Amino acid sequence: MAALGATVADVAALCDRLWPKERAESWDNVGLLAGDPGAAVGRCLCALDADEVTVAAAVAAGAQLLVAHHPLPWRPLSRLIATEPSQAALLAAARGDVAVYAAHTNFDVHPAGTSRALADVLGLQAPRLLQVTGRESFYKLVVFVPLDHAPALREALDRAGAGRLGNYSACSFTSAGTGRFRPEAGAAPAIGRPGELAEVAEERLEVLVPARARAAVLEAMRAAHPYEEPAYDLLPLENSGEAYGLGMVGAAERPAELEVFAGFVAARLTAPTTRFVGDARRVVRKVAVCGGAGMVCAADALRVGADVLVTADIRYHEARDAEARGLALVDPGHHASEVPGVVALAEQLGAALRGAAWDVDVRLEPPRADVWKRADASRPVGELGAWA
C-alpha cells in the first residue's frame, strides 16, 4: 500500500485513539492545543515538555507537529504576551507553523504508558498494573452492505480501529441475506430507482468497536459504504477489555539493598540527583513504580507488599509518612522518571502511523539535561565573604 499524506487533524485523531482524552484527569489539558488542523504533516517531534526549547527544536528539525507529554499551555489563556515563557512558546510555534499536541495523564494511565516504560527500563519482572482506574469499553457495529462492496468496507473498518480482540486484528463475522428498500423522492440511490422496491444481495457485517475508536469507525463506515443511507446498528456491550490505570509493580531484576538499588535507578535513568527514603540496608525484592508525581500510588504499593516505590516530586511529610509505614522510596526526579515514557510514546505513534500508511517521520527531541543540578558538597564555603 502506498504511503499517504497526513494532516495535523489526521495525526491528532490517531493520537486520540491511541491515548483516549476522556481518560485524562479533569484538570489536565490534552489533545490538539495549537495549530492548523488542515496543515500537512511530514515530520513530528516527540518531547517531554512543550516549551520554547522544544518548539525551537521542532522548527530546526523541520517538524510540523510537536507531540509532548506536558501540555502547552497548561491552562486556558486570556492573553498572549511574548515576555511570558509559555505564551512565548506558543507564539514561536505559530510563527514556525508547528502544531502542538499533548498526551499527558491519558498517556500516564495507558497500559503501555509512562509507568510501564519506567518498569521496563528498570528491568522489573512480570510488571502488572498497580492502581486500576478503568477498563476499555466496547460497542458492536452491525452494518448491511452489498456483497461486492463488503471487502472494501471491512478493510476501512480495520484501518479505523475496529475488529481488534487481544492480539488479533481484522476480526469480523458475516452472514449473507437480502436487503430491501424503496428509494423515495429526492433520494440518489447507488442501487435501484426512486419509487421502485429494490432487492440486493447483502452481507451482514458484525465487528467489535473499542469506545476510543467509535467516532473514527463510524466515519470510516460512512465513507466506505456505497449507500447514501447505510443501515447499521451500534450496540453498547457489557464486555470489558484491557484495564488501565496508574503505576506498575513487579519483581526486581535481582534482590539488592536499598542504597544499592537507588544507585541502580540513578544509573539506569541517568539521574544523578536521585534520593531515597528508608533503611539503606533493607533488601529490595518487590518494586512499585509510577512515572512523574506518583505518591498517589503509595497506598497501593503498600497494599501489594512492595518494598519500595520509585516515583518523583515526593514531599517531606509524604516521605515521613511512608517511612513510618515501612515503605521505602526512591525519587530520581520528575524528568528522569518520564523520559522512558516519551520514548515509548514516540514508538507507539510511529507504529500507528505506519499501520495507517501515513507518510510521517517521527523523531525524538534531542537529549536534554534535567532542570535540576547537583550541588557539590566537597567544596564547602568557610566564610560568608567567599560567596561573592
Image (cartoon, rainbow, N blue to C red):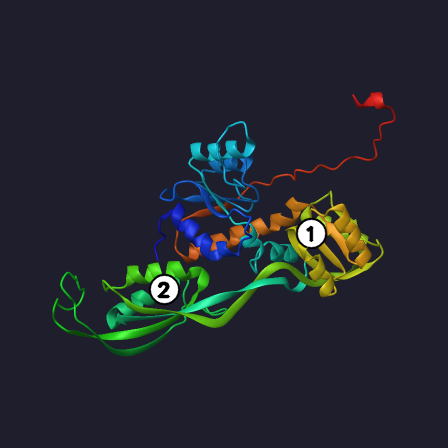
- Residue at x 23% of width, y 62% of height: 228
Q: Quadrant of residue 258?
A: bottom right
Quick check: 302 left or right of 36? Answer: right
Q: Quadrant of the N terminus?
A: bottom left
* Residue type, mark 2 in image: Leu
* Label 2 element class: helix
Crowd rating for badge 2 (residues with CA inside 10 Å; few <14, some 14–19, many 20+) = many
Quick check: 379 left or right of 181? Answer: right
Pointer 1 residue: 311
Quick check: 326 left or right of 14? Answer: right
- Residue 220 higher or lower than 38, as above or below: below
Crowd rating for badge 1 (residues with CA inside 10 Å; few <14, some 14–19, many 20+) = many
Q: Are marks 2 and 1 in contact (CB under 8 Å)?
A: no
- Residue at x 42% of width, y 48% of height: 360
* Residue type, mark 1 in image: Thr
Q: Is residue 379 or residue 216 the one in the foreground?
A: 216
Q: Which mark is residue 157?
A: 2
